[in-house]
Image (cartoon, helix red, strand yellow):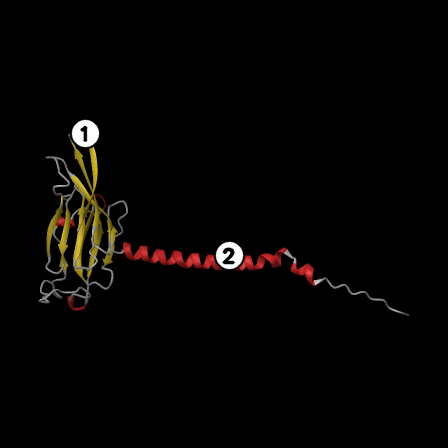
Amino acid sequence: MPYNMTLKIAPLARWDASPRCVLRPLALRWTSMKLILIALMLFIAHVVFAADGYLIVASPKVCKQGLYHQPSGGPFSVFLFCDDALGSNIGIINTADGAGPGTIPLPQPKTWDKWDVNDRFWQQPEWATDVNSFAWSPDLRFLYVATSGIYGTGDLYKLDLVKRTYVTLLPDSRTPVELNHGFTTEITHVDIKTGELTVEFETFRKSAGKTVVSTVRVK
């Protein structure tokens, strides 16, 4: 008895015309674009994180107690104390082996005699009290400290870590202060290429009848 069998084969043109096949190259292209975008975002995040390593916000609202190391292999660290109602306070520690200069380039003559294995900690009430932000200089030789005028002085200080000395940068002629009115400084940005700082200076001006915030740049 004869047996008839019909075999149906779909034409290739039908498969070629399938929307899934047409869209597959586009999907692959979109996947590649997403991977490139993710890689770019990770790179940008790395750069931003590296820049942020030079500036630490220390105000009580965001204070995180602990040791903050210098970036780029520097020998110094700041210990940030979050003392609640007493504000944020800091101390500087040389955490390098042998209390040496680490990666700090020393000028001629290359003298390093202000730090020792038994003299690693530095704290002065003027710049260590009621700190709201601090920043490392790009060459790691200096630490800038901005203070609040509640328990601290409100001044902006520049600490020479090699010589273990400090000076006051603000207030100055650009940021006049009225008698019996306090003020506060806060570092908001550090340019790691030029070393220039952007600082907000806040004070009450009786003549204006309000609190005035000025933005100044220092180095």
Measured Cα–Cα span from mark 1 to mark 2: 58 Å
Residue 150 picture quarter: top left
Q: Residue at x 41, y 59 (%)?
A: 39
Name the foreground residue: 144 vs 31. Answer: 31
Residue 66 picture quarter: bottom left
Locate residue 126 relative to residue 186 in the image: left or right. Answer: left
Q: Amino acid at mark 2?
A: Trp
Name the foreground residue: 136 vs 11. Answer: 11
Marker disc for residue 186: none
Residue 199 x %, y %: 21, 46
Which residue bears the numbered disc 2?
30
Which residue bears the numbered disc 1?
209
The residue mark sitting in front, 1 or 2, is 2
Q: Residue at x 12, y 52 (%)?
A: 124
Question: Regarding mark 1 in the picture, which secondary structure is present there?
Answer: loop
| Residue at the extreme right of the image, as rendered | 1
